[in-house]
Amino acid sequence: MKQSADTSVSNLNPLSSQYFLTVMDWEVLRQWEREDKERYNQEITRNRQKLLIVFKNIIKYKLMNLNKCFLLGRTTGDVESKVTPTGQKVATFNMATNRYYKDAQGNKKEEVQFHRIIAWTGLAEVCSSYLKKGEIVLIVGRIQNRSWEAKDGSKRSVTEIVAEDVQLAPKPKVAQPQTEDEEIPIIEDGQDLDLSSINF
């Protein structure tokens, strides 16, 4: 899905991932991540303040309940996909997010959290086609807790993020020619994906 010519923050839905992507150029962000961890962490923290817009909307529209999360990190493995007995495609993968901070002695520390992501239908197609291990990805979704009984009778549980919007970082520039308006598709959960429009 291609963005319109006017992509200013004021014209975007503050609950969408595109809002956060317009306030920081991906290539600059990736360069800082490689070369300047402290500046990268500061910029991510600054942009997270944009989430205040979300809470302003909650008050405005009197939404008393909200299950929404935003994750920006890297995939830790390839996507696993399958088709359910009802014919729905589902994709699952894991991603890691990093937090940088200073301890009581002033030493720089890094904390890593791992998250399980699940995507359905059209989003599952996009994730299966484009996501690989080590990719930077932005996930907007909801938290889901599930529990079940294993074959041995033990109780199992998992916390996962059900993706509602997936945004991939631009690929590094390569020598081969590419069209300037070529973009990786973004599909909302529940939409169908026209595979004929994708160049594999």
Image: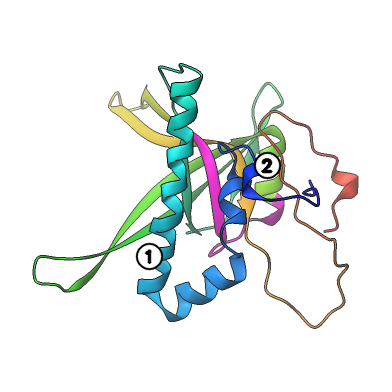
Tell me what residue is drawn at x 66 percent, y 32 percent: 189
Q: Where is residue 99 in the image (x, y as percent from the top left)?
A: 32, 59
Secondary-structure class at tag 2: helix
Extent of the magenta region: 129-142
Secondary-structure class at tag 1: helix
Above or below for 102 versus 11: below
Relative placement, left or right, of 51 versus 138 is: left
Q: Where is residue 44 in the image (x, y as percent from the top left)?
A: 43, 59
Q: In which quarter of the image is the C terminus?
A: bottom right
Q: Which amino acid does label 1 sit on?
A: Gln
**Label of residue 42 in the image:** 1
* Neighbourhood count class around disc 2 (C-alpha, 10 Å): few under 14, some 14–19, many 20 upward: few
Frontmost residue, 108 versus 59: 59
Frontmost residue, 143 versus 9: 9
Which mark is nearer the camera, 2 or 1? Answer: 2
**Is 149 within the magenta?**
no
Q: Position of residue 67 (x, y in %)?
A: 44, 27
Tell me what residue is drawn at x 67 percent, y 64 percent: 170
Q: How many labels does the image show?
A: 2
Frontmost residue, 140 versus 23: 23
